[in-house]
Image (cartoon, helix red, strand yellow):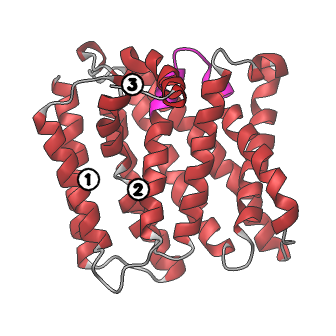
Amino acid sequence: MLVSPDARKTLDLFETSVDMMTPNPTRTSMTPEVLRGILFMCIAVSLFPLLNTAVKYLSAELTLITIIWFRYASHFVYITAAFTPGRGIRRLFTSARPKTQIVRSMLLLLATYLYVVAISYIPLTTAAIISFTSPLMVLALSTPILGERVGIHRWIAVIIGFIGALIIIRPSSDATHWSVFLVLGTAACYAMYQIMTRALASHDEAETTGIYSALVGVVVMSALLPFYWEMPSGWLHWGLLLSLGITGGFGHYLVIKAYERGPAAVIAPFGYVQLIGATIFGYFVFGDFPDRWTWLGAAVIIGSGLYIAYRESRL
């Protein structure tokens, strides 16, 4: 297959992750480390609905650039203050794969922007469910990027999972909002982000990976902020904006720690816990509750994801 120079550079960023993504039967048992990884993932995805609820509420009052800048700026301040005393500035910012860190962080920033735009228009639960296609995309991308073999059973599960997404989106329906397709873009970016996070786990500490996530985001958003700045008004706005760094920053840090402690096939399915919080906050804060088609699509997507995890653990 002919590959352009830019594409080859991208492939080089991922080649070190092949051994990390290859299923390893010896790591799938529920050891204390794996159980800690599951706990970290559950805590992380319990924080994300809080983050998304605050963002959706603020999007009615402030520009999206202002909101995203606060999310990354507060993330950067909190995580730097938390980890510098134990590691020192130099060790915290020193990466064995700085280019990979930057590309990974840009993917997270793009995923964040697309998701923030989407949830300003559609219910939190709908966005969360569609974003669950990300693990399916990780599997689909593992063949062209990592050169891994994916069996027919898992390919069928991927296809069925995307059918579930189509049930929710219903492209021919007049009720479908264009922003649902942005969530699919978020899922694609997040899938690449997950692959790169897994690849970096054997090279950089989780604290370094977390600090780069914040650093790249705050640099890019600071360049845009002067053109879109809007002053928050009232203690509620300020409180919600300052909370974004805690829920977003430490949530993603816990995701990194989770993938350090267990195989993706075991850890990833616990990301579906996010649906509980998204449904609760969506209903009580915004009065949104999924219709029967959304629940049907959710069942199909989650069922496909769980089947893939089962196949990975068997292999």
- The residue that mark 3 highlights is 262
Question: What's the mark number on residue 302?
Answer: 1
Residue 69: percent from the left, percent from the top? 76, 56
Residue 188: percent from the left, percent from the top? 43, 48
Badge 2 amino acid: Ser
Taking the spot 51% from the left edge, 45% from the top edge, the residue there is 44
Pointer 3 local density, CA inside 10 Å: few below 14, some 14–19, many at least 20 = many
Question: What's the mark number on residue 131?
Answer: 2
Taking the spot 77% from the left edge, 72% from the top edge, the residue there is 236
Tell me the CA gap for discs 1 and 3.
20 Å
Q: Main secondary structure of the magenta part?
A: helix
Whichever of callouts 1 and 3 sits on the residue coming sooner in the sequence is: 3
Q: Is residue 203 magenta?
A: yes
Camera-nearest residue between 72 and 111: 111
Residue 212 placement, left or right of 184: right
Camera-nearest residue between 115 and 147: 147
Tell me the CA gap for discs 2 and 1.
11 Å
Badge 3 amino acid: Gly
What residue range appears in magenta?
Answer: 195-208
